[in-house]
Image: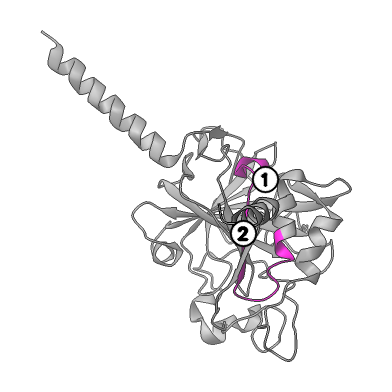
Amino acid sequence: MESWIPALLSVLVLNPFRTSTLKVPPLNYCYTDDTCGPYQWVTSFPSCITKDSTLHSPINLKHVDIRNDSVDPLELRGFTKPQSSWTVRNARDTVAVEFQAGMSANGGSIKHNYRIVEMRFHWGTNITNGSEHKLDGRRFPMEMQIVGVAHGFADVEAASANQSGLLMLGVFIDIASAENKAFKALSQAVSNVKYPGDSISVTPPALSDLLPEDRKYYQYHGGQTVPPCRQTVTWIVFEKPIFISREQYLPFVTRLYYTDKSDTAEKLLVENYRFIQPRLNRQIFVSSAVDLTSGSASAAALNQHASIIMLLILISTMP
């Protein structure tokens, strides 16, 4: 064996992170500059205008919202099995985490089978704000949003142009003294994606480990919280938060920039949340039924296919 090969293998084993940088085009919206902040999005994106006939997000959720125990359980498939890697990247307006194939969501009162493709984060500048949704008027320090694409659509952009094309699972994040072991790989990765286009590959936990143990949730029809603000999202927001330590929270508010590395002035990516939208007369349901299954979306399809074949065989052998 060549003498350099053992050394290379030892580096790959000791360092599970693989970093890269891709060019990210500038956005014509931002969060903290007056010229391009959320109140100015309508200048470039008329679909972000709030009207009496539009159902925008985020909204304020309330404990008094109607509970609906008649809704079938929401099924989250593949969430309990850790994937081999996730890609964490600075997307200029957020930290995005890209998943591998194999996770899906269906059941409950959602209209489609959704392929889970990524998650995104929103945060503030201190531990009193940052989440996009509110619960009883309170903003949490952060919100994690898991994105699902309806069957038949290639990606988020294609799905967002169709009614109920997107599913968003919102998880509030609060601060505690203890470290969240499942969140550790993500918080460490954030320090390595400082500028737009920076990305890093990490060994992740099971996605179910990043969900609250109490999975009571609110469901409503709303929209994207970033331009073009299309109202094509089925929102499911868990009532209970997950907890991370202050040390795990700080990289988000101190180490990320929405300006490029070559820019002379560095601008921190903070307060990347949209202001609260009117609830209007839309229905908001509350449910506590969530089923976590270890099987992936493809495994479920294979099992269903096998069951159909067995049924046909039995029918053909009947006298």
Percent across and percent down for residue 107 are 46, 38
Answer yes or no: is residue 66 visible: no
Q: Over which residues does the magenta segment extend? A: 189-210
Percent across and percent down for residue 247 are 85, 57
Residue 4 tag number: 2
Percent across and percent down for residue 271 are 74, 71
User: Quarter of the image containing the C terminus?
Assistant: top left
Left or right of 105 in this view: 6 = right
Q: Quadrant of residue 119?
A: bottom right
Q: Secondary structure at mark 2?
A: helix
Q: Residues within 10 Å of mark 2 (few under 14, many from 20)?
A: few
Left or right of 104 in this view: 204 = right
Name the N-terminal-most of marks 2 and 1: 2
Percent across and percent down for residue 65 are 65, 46
Amino acid, disc 2: Trp
Q: What colour scheme does the image use? A: one colour
Residue 210 tag number: 1
Q: Quadrant of residue 300?
A: top left
Q: Secondary structure at mark 1?
A: helix
The foreground one among 275 and 203 is 203
Q: Is residue 197 magenta?
A: yes
Asked if the residue under mark 1 is in contact with the one under mark 2, i.e. CB atoms within 8 Å, the reply is: no
Amino acid, disc 1: Leu
Answer yes or no: is residue 27 visible: yes
Between the residue at mark 2 and the residue at mark 1, the CA separation in whole angstroms equals 39 Å
